[in-house]
Amino acid sequence: MKALTWHGKRDVRVEEVPDPRIEEPTDAIVRITSTAICGSDLHLYEVLGPYLKPGDILGHEPMGIVEEVGPGVTRLKPGDRVVVPFNISCGDCWMCRRQLYAQCETTQVTSEGKGASLFGYTSLYGAVPGGQAEYLRVPYAQFGPVKIPETGADERYLYLSDILPTAWQAVKYADTPPGGTLAVFGLGPVGQFCARIGRHLGAERVIGLDLVPERLEMARRHGIETLDVSELDDVPTTLIDLVDGRGPDAVIDAVGMEAHGSTAGKLAQTAAGLLPDKLAQTMTDKVGVDRLVVLKAALKAVRRGGTVSISGVYGGEVDPLPLMEMFDRGIQLRMGQCHVRRWTDEIMPLLSGDDDPLGVEDLRTHRVPLARAPQAYEMFQKKQDGCVKVVLAP
């Protein structure tokens, strides 16, 4: 089969690789019909190379048709249409019984001190082959895949694999009071959904912040107030002044480790990437730093007693935070990898009706053949051609 494989920094290639096969009784083989490029895939493209090896198959936002199931899979059959969550969870361990699926004890990568295994996401998370391919082996298929209706555009359901439940969790964690104000830093795909979900779940006012014109325009189409941060001298003060002199009740950081404007963090990440893999892994694990300009702005902008919810991916170990200010202002902080299956049943009714209350069919800006995935990665990273979200068609 054809699959997108990693070969080095900003070097991904579509190659012929062996077809996956059933290896365990609870496996399924899914023929991929759509698979998206996630913002966190760009961390692999740019920052996390020390945890990859040439030939690793990327991608963790897939959906498709079940081709084959192992004898331990009774809830799926060949021909079923499914979305595959990005985290691999057994559904039955101590963590899974508490709906903490991103911490599944069956698939935890204990050797690296990490949570549940992920598709296509480095040796830190199990080195499991990903879904930017023609076929995907899905472990623990007796629990993970989400069955969806046989009809309807792929983009109506595809985002259940990651970014839609990730945004849903971020908004739930933000806990904006009814009639309150939610600010969303970063209007990439997750941020777009955070803003729309925030409105859907009752925030009276949602303010989205970004610096990419196409992202700002997309948010405005969905009734979101927008701020172009490139035009602001002091983002936290602007938000505080905009919201009753107090600041938003809740703020979501939907950006993460590769924020624009953090020169020192960028230099540190670049330097680590130049080291031999083993040394780079040690440096990242022990003294890794992030670009914290967005997180610090979120912490300073939220009102006293408010909540900051982090959905953007961070990987640092020694990042300094303004703890005295956070403590004095009584800020609550929530974060973490999304527990996808915790939210999918809650979200599904919003996708399966005739309307589209979350605007899921107004997110994808580019649908391209899998063969053009390397060009799509470059376009997405450089924010070219109005690119907000790329879907690959194997």
Image (cartoon, rainbow, N blue to C red):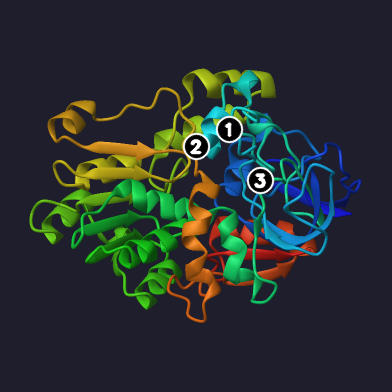
Q: Secondary structure at mark 3?
A: loop
Instruction: Identify the residue at horizontal 82%, vertical 54% (top origin).
Output: 135
Q: Nearer the viewer, residue 232 or 20?
A: 20
Q: Amino acid at mark 3?
A: Phe
Instruction: Identify the residue at horizontal 54%, vertical 28% (top origin).
Output: 94
Q: Amino acid at mark 1?
A: Cys
Q: Secondary structure at mark 2?
A: loop
Q: Nearer the viewer, residue 360 or 289?
A: 360
Residues packed near mark 3 inside 10 Å, few (<14), some (14 to 19) or many (20 plus)? some
Res. 294 mark = none
Instruction: Identify the residue at horizontal 48%, vertical 34% (top origin).
Output: 267
Q: Tell me: 126 left or right of 19.
A: left
Instruction: Identify the residue at horizontal 67%, vertical 19% (top origin).
Output: 278
Residue 139, quarter of picture? top right
Residue 178 in percent (x, y) is at: 20, 60
Question: Can residue 253 be spotted in the picture?
Answer: no
User: Distance of mark 3 from mark 2, alpha carbons?
Assistant: 14 Å
Res. 143 mark = 3
- Exactly how many numbered labels are in the figure? 3
List the residue tagged with mark 2: 100
User: Distance of mark 1 from mark 3, alpha carbons?
Assistant: 12 Å
Q: Nearer the viewer, residue 292 or 190?
A: 190
Q: Tell me: 301 left or right of 115.
A: left
Which of the two discs, 3 and 2, sits closer to the camera?
3
Which comes before the other along the chain, label 1 or label 3? 1
Q: Quadrant of the N terminus?
A: bottom right
Residue 321, quarter of picture? top left
Q: Amino acid at mark 2?
A: Leu
List the residue tagged with mark 1: 104
Q: Are marks 1 and 2 in contact (CB under 8 Å)?
A: yes
